[in-house]
Amino acid sequence: MIMTAPGGRRGYNTHNMPERTNKIWLADLRNPGPAQEAALADLRGIIQTGLKYTLQTWLSPNDPRYPSLVEEVTQDTLLRVLDRLDSFEGRSKFTTWVHSIAVRLALTELRRSKWRDVSLESLLEKDSDNFREREVTEPQPNPEAQVERNLLIEQVKQMMLEELTEKQRNAMLAVVIHGMPIEEVARRMDTNRNALYKLMHDGRLKLKQRLAREGLSVEEVLGVFEVM
C-alpha cells in the first residue's frame, strides 16, 4: 500500500505555487524520496477531487460505499501510475492521464459491485421465465406480429441449446442478455478475459452458420432481442 500524507508537501498544486509540468511530474515520481512522496500526496488529492465530480452520476459522496471505493481506487491508481510511467506519451496533461486511469478503475469496481451478490447460476436460471414473461407482457402492433416474434425467440433458444456448448451458452446469456461485465463472467467461470472472448466468438460463429442454414438473417434475430 502507498502511504501518503493528505495534501501536497511541496505545494505545486496550491494557489501560491506553480503547477507541475509533465516533465516535473515524471521526474519526481521516478525518484524515491521526499520529491516522490510529495508528488504522490498531491496526486492523491487530485484523484480524489476528480472522482468526487466524475462519480456523482453513479454514486453520491453521501453513499456509505463512497469512502471505501474512493480510497481503494486512489491506491490502485497510484500503484498503476508508478508502474506505467514509461507508457505516458505526453499527449495530454499528466494529471488528465492519471484521472482517466482512476475513472476506468472506479467504473470497473462499480460494475463489479453491482453483480457481487448475484450468482451466475441464479442469473441463468431466470432465462426461461424472463423469455416467457416478456413474450406475454410486451405490447405488439398486432397478434400476428406477437406470434411471429414468439416463434422466432423459441427458434433462437433451440439453436443455442443445439449449437452451443454449455459454457458458450452461459457466457453469451450472461454477457449479451443480462449485461454482466465480461471480467466478472470470466472470474465466475474460472477463466480469463481473452479466453472468454474466444469462447464467445466461436459461439457467435456457430449461431451465424446455423442462422444461415435456417434462412434467417442476423438482423432479424437482433431485431427481436433489441426489445428484450
Image: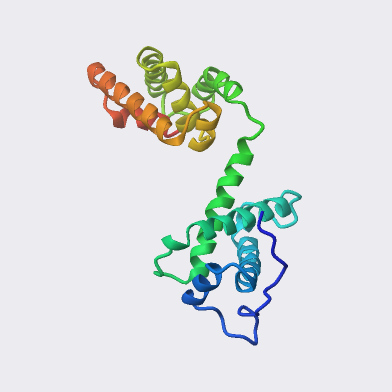
Q: In the rendered view, tell whether residue 64 sits above or below residue 157.
A: below
Q: Is residue 177 above or below residue 97?
A: above
Q: Quadrant of residue 89?
A: bottom left
Q: Quadrant of residue 219?
A: top left
Say which of 36 and 68 sits in front. 36
Q: Nearer the viewer, residue 122 or 31?
A: 31
**Can residue 181 be seen here?**
no
Give the x, y percent position of residue 22. Answer: 47, 74
Q: How many marks?
A: 0
Tell me, yes or no, if residue 19 can be seen here.
Answer: yes
Residue situated in front as seen by the camera: 157 or 43: 43
Residue 226 percent location from the top left of the image: 42, 34
Tell me which residue sits at (75%, 56%) in the image.
62
Q: Closer to the camera, 9 or 168?
A: 9
Q: Using the image, determine if residue 82 lies above or below residue 21.
A: above
Q: What colouring does the structure picture have?
A: rainbow
Q: Position of residue 201 (x, y in %)?
A: 34, 30
Q: Is residue 202 left or right of residue 142?
A: left
Residue 84 is situated, as x and y percent measured from the top left of the image, at 48, 58
Seen at 71% across and 57% down, the residue is 61
Q: What residue appears at the point 38 percent right and 24 percent down from the top-left corner?
A: 145
